[in-house]
Image (cartoon, grey):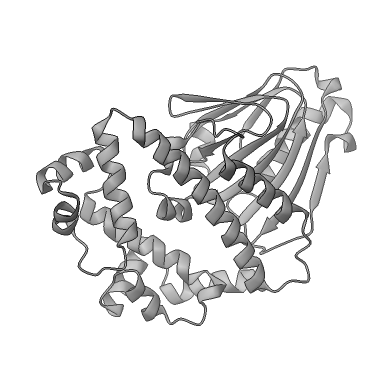
Amino acid sequence: MDINNRQQAVADIKSLSTDTVCKTEKIAFWTDMVCQHLIQVDCSLIAPQVQFHGTIHLRKIAHVDISQVAASAQQVTRTKRLIKETDDEYFLLNIQRQGSSLVRQDGREASLVSGDMALYSSARCYELAFDSAFSQTVLVFPADMMRTMIPTIDTLTATTLSSQNPTTKLLTLMADYCFQTSFETISMHTMAHAANALTEIFATNIAEFSAGIDAVKSNLTLFHMARIKQYVFDNLNDPELSVQKVSQSLRISPAHIHRLFKMEEQTLSAWIWTRRLLACKLALQNPAKSHLTISQIAYSCGFNSSSHFSRVFRTKFGITASEWRENKLRALNP
């Protein structure tokens, strides 16, 4: 299983260790373990290979992967070459349990000690540095889902989320509880709810830190972009949502909005449609919403025509909405 093939809804804890191979093969085996079960990266050792030790224990709960990782000192890098080999994007969250580490991405560097957290995206280059033996809990969330919930999440990559914050402690406890719980006898719907609860706590944690950073930012561009994106997310179910409505509600001129979104790959109008489509995509794969028709989901995300939704969904994702839903729900209940 790699980052592009996360199909099984839940599995027993899978455990892997470099103790199973000879000393001269440890780093190759370790890199292969990380690439197959976390994300494709390059690993280089700081300690001599013969002394290297590493273990991974992982559990998948619906759309969330939780891993316990412990290893010797090393450097980890995700390069442009590796990024090109994968299509899906994920946000990874490292919770430092023992030792210390550095997370570098987007021109920022987070320094972690026990209890601290940092997030980073699989779609952009990053570096992880461990100068001594360490252990971490690593959570992996779908990026589309997180950006729908927290549009400003990218402003917090490689930022230290302190263990002193109550929501950080709550997220750690919830991650530990989910990892330690045996889900094998629990229904798929219940597992999906558990994964959603963990995702909501993660989003709450990120939103709180994001709000704190926004309060002291002097960069008005980032401030206004965050306001606009949050307003869109909060009003996505409004079929009348438009640049003009955002302008009137936030008292930002349409011309200024246009200038702000020149930094983005899309205009605000296109960004709104993309958010709607991604929200529908996530809702369609959610077992808790399987009782809703595709049209009901489309209308709840701001579409006012089911036929138009069907056309743009297929154009955007290369698959019909019904095929997407069928494939994802089947994967949750093989």
User: Which quadrant would residue 330 be assigned to in this image?
Assistant: bottom right
Q: Is residue 280 left or right of residue 53?
A: left
Q: Is residue 141 left or right of residue 303?
A: right
Which quadrant of the figure contains the C terminus?
A: bottom right
Q: Is residue 328 visible?
A: yes
* Residue 320 vs residue 96, the one in the foreground: 96
Q: Is residue 264 left or right of residue 139?
A: left
Q: Vertical placement of 228 versus 131: above or below?
A: below
Q: Vertical placement of 197 versus 208: above or below?
A: below
Q: Residue at x 10, y 44 (%)?
A: 255
* Residue 323 vs residue 61, the one in the foreground: 61
Residue 16 lies, in percent from the top left, at 81, 43
Q: Is residue 334 visible?
A: no
Residue 185 lies, in percent from the top left, at 78, 71
Q: Vertical placement of 211 versus 102: above or below?
A: below
Q: Residue at x 33, y 59 (%)?
A: 234
Residue 106 lies, in percent from the top left, at 43, 29
Residue 95 lies, in percent from the top left, at 65, 37
